[in-house]
């Protein structure tokens, strides 16, 4: 077992990348972002053209035909002889004001694109290339095609005769299911066939990709209910029915606590796979790349068959076991309460000192200068006042003269004030020095009162705390709850409205859960804290501006009683 010291800080993705060091000659090389392509917007559903160009959809880009609310226009990037990707260019001829997704290329001069129906009828449409421009040809005749979901994903098989697709349609088990349609004649395709209950669940199955021999199916699903986003799985077709499959297995090298989707091979020969991940983005996808050696097919890198490779005598069983434990921890530790101590943004050689308040905190007596009042009736309050810094150190004062002297020494960064029955205040030193009328107003902590936990920040697209300041604020919240032992609270997570609504709701709930985990770890009873995740359904500002979206990405504390 490899020991991971709690005083060291490791990125969530870094743990499973560490595992590649043990067997990089046998397994996948390090997963990395596709350089030069990713943006602050939603890159998803990559497809490779016969020339090796990368076509993909970009959602919510302001240059999309439908603007910043457009779920996806078609964009393209080309790779030079050195393997470098060009700056992506939007393809106007393939894009509408609705959701647009490249399905595949029947040949070098043809492309199939799904449109959701805003300008062209809902379904898969064919375009032909004349010179550098794509020109509309016709809509495919897919019998009984219907998609009641806002989402669509699908891929054309290498031989051009099969489309595997994700839709919510006739016979779906729950949300989006995987279906297959077969080409019967020129422009005529069969009714989509549901791939069956081994593949499909009552949750979401999306972004299918079929191997060149049409035996191995890759897809993404959230069916395992691990409290995370979607993971990439594979399954092998057992016969010619397309409804008999092996139990899906997760591909462990790619999956994180975020959502991974859109798996595709860059080519059959170079062993490079591309997929999207939201691990480092706010509910949006970034294109990622991983390269394999030829020893092991990509689909064999699943969580349940690491030991199967021992017969190849590439590495000892003991090392395989060790690697598998690290890989397991890389995912499972993100659900562990202790993970809150290992902040994603701190360097690996740094330490985070979590100081839990001790009743023997030193107290300095001096006369008070600034009044601490209840905002309800301006009555004067008995309070406790602290200086704190971003290392988690905290010093308590009974009054303020020595506090002001300590401020000038440069050891501390904020003033924290609590009073029984009132919500605490966290002030910067400048705010403290420039208080209007020399008064601090504290809001009564009565049922229905809510505040935004403004200084708790998360890494983009994750529930990992972004900085030591967030830990400091959490420690202050612990102090507040210990001083008000009868209070019960609700933590409500919110995001903006961009990205996958299901994923946003899941992310907002995980962030509220992470805060609750930290509080309970530091002595607050679990039953005093309830959580909710609202995703982007309760905005407080305009989502069409960056400032508004920042305000909408928040966690609120609500007093319940």
Image (cartoon, grey):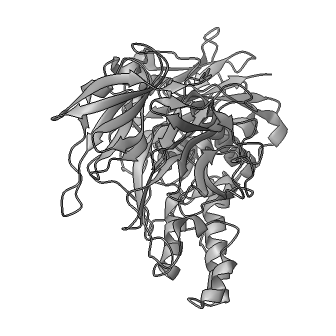
Measured as percent of width and height from the top left, residue 510 is found at: 64, 40
The answer to which of 397 and 121 lies nearer the viewer is 121
Name the residue at 84% across, 37% down. Answer: 527
Q: Is residue 372 shown above or below 359?
A: above
Q: Quadrant of residue 72?
A: top left
Q: Is residue 310 shown above or below 68?
A: below
How many dots with numbers?
0
Measured as percent of width and height from the top left, residue 540 is found at: 51, 15
Q: Name the outermost residue toward the top.
A: 377
In the rendered structure, the answer to whether residue 67 lies left or right of residue 425 reads left
Quarter of the picture holding the N terminus: bottom right
In the rendered structure, the answer to whether residue 48 lies left or right of residue 332 reads left
The answer to which of 339 and 320 lies nearer the viewer is 320
Measured as percent of width and height from the top left, residue 124 is found at: 46, 27
Q: Is residue 464 shown above or below 74?
A: below
In the rendered structure, the answer to whether residue 492 lies left or right of residue 265 reads right
Measured as percent of width and height from the top left, residue 560 is found at: 77, 22
Name the residue at 55% across, 60% down. Answer: 353
Name the residue at 30% across, 36% down. Answer: 75
The answer to which of 487 and 342 lies nearer the viewer is 342
Q: Name the outermost residue toward the left.
A: 131
Residue 370 appearing in the image: no
Quarter of the picture holding the C terminus: top right
Q: Quadrant of residue 171?
A: top right
Residue 378 appearing in the image: yes
Name the residue at 70% across, 45% down. Answer: 227
The answer to which of 472 and 330 lies nearer the viewer is 330
Q: Quadrant of residue 120?
A: top left
């Amino acid at each position: 077992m490899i020991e991971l010291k709690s005083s060291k800080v490791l990125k969530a993705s870094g743990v499973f990348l560490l595992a590649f060091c043990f067997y990089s000659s046998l397994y996948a090389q390090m997963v990395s972002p596709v350089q030069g392509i990713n943006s602050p917007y939603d890159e998803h559903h990559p497809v490779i053209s016969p020339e090796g160009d990368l076509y993909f959809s970009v959602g919510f880009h302001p240059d999309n035909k439908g603007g910043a609310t457009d779920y996806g226009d078609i964009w393209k990037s080309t790779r030079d002889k050195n393997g470098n990707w060009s700056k992506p260019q939007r393809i106007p001829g393939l894009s509408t004001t609705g959701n647009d997704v490249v399905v595949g290329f029947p040949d070098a001069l043809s492309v199939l694109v799904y449109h959701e129906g805003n300008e062209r009828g809902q379904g898969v449409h064919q375009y032909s290339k004349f010179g550098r421009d794509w020109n509309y040809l016709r809509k495919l005749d897919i019998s009984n095609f219907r998609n009641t979901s806002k989402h669509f994903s699908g891929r054309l098989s290498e031989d051009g005769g099969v489309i595997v697709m994700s839709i919510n349609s006739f016979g779906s088990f729950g949300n989006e299911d995987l279906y297959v349609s077969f080409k019967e004649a020129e422009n005529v395709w069969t009714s989509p066939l549901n791939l069956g209950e081994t593949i499909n669940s009552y949750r979401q199955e999306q972004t299918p990709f079929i191997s060149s021999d049409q035996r191995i199916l890759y897809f993404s699903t959230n069916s395992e209910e691990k409290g995370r986003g979607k993971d990439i799985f594979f399954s092998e077709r057992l016969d010619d029915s397309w409804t008999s499959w092996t139990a899906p297995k997760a591909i462990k090298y790619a999956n994180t606590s975020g959502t991974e989707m859109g798996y595709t091979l860059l080519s059959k020969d170079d062993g490079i796979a591309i997929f999207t991940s939201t691990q480092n983005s706010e509910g949006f996808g970034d294109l990622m790349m991983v390269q394999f050696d030829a020893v092991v097919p990509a689909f064999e890198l699943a969580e349940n068959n690491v030991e199967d490779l021992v017969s190849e005598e590439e590495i000892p069983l003991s090392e395989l076991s060790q690697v598998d434990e690290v890989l397991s921890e890389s995912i499972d530790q993100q659900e562990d309460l202790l993970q809150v101590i290992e902040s994603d943004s701190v360097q690996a050689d740094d330490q985070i000192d979590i100081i839990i308040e001790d009743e023997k905190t030193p107290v300095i007596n001096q006369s008070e200068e600034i009044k601490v009042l209840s905002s309800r009736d301006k009555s004067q309050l008995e309070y406790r006042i602290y200086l704190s810094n971003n290392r988690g150190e905290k010093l308590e004062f009974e009054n303020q003269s020595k506090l002001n002297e300590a401020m000038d020494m440069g050891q501390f960064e904020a003033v924290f004030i609590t009073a029984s029955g009132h919500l605490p205040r966290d002030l910067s030193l400048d705010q403290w020095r420039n208080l209007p009328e020399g008064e601090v107003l504290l809001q009564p902590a009565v049922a229905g009162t809510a505040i935004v936990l403004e200084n708790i920040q998360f890494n983009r697209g994750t529930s990992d705390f972004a900085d030591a300041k967030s830990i400091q604020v959490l420690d202050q919240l612990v102090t507040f709850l210990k001083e008000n032992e009868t209070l019960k609270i609700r933590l409500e997570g919110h995001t903006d409205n961009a990205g996958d609504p299901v994923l946003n709701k899941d992310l907002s709930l995980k962030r509220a859960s992470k805060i609750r985990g930290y509080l309970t770890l530091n002595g607050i009873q679990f039953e005093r804290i309830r959580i909710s995740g609202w995703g982007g359904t309760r905005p407080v500002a305009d989502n069409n501006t960056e400032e508004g979206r920042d305000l909408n990405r928040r966690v609120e504390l609500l007093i319940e009683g």
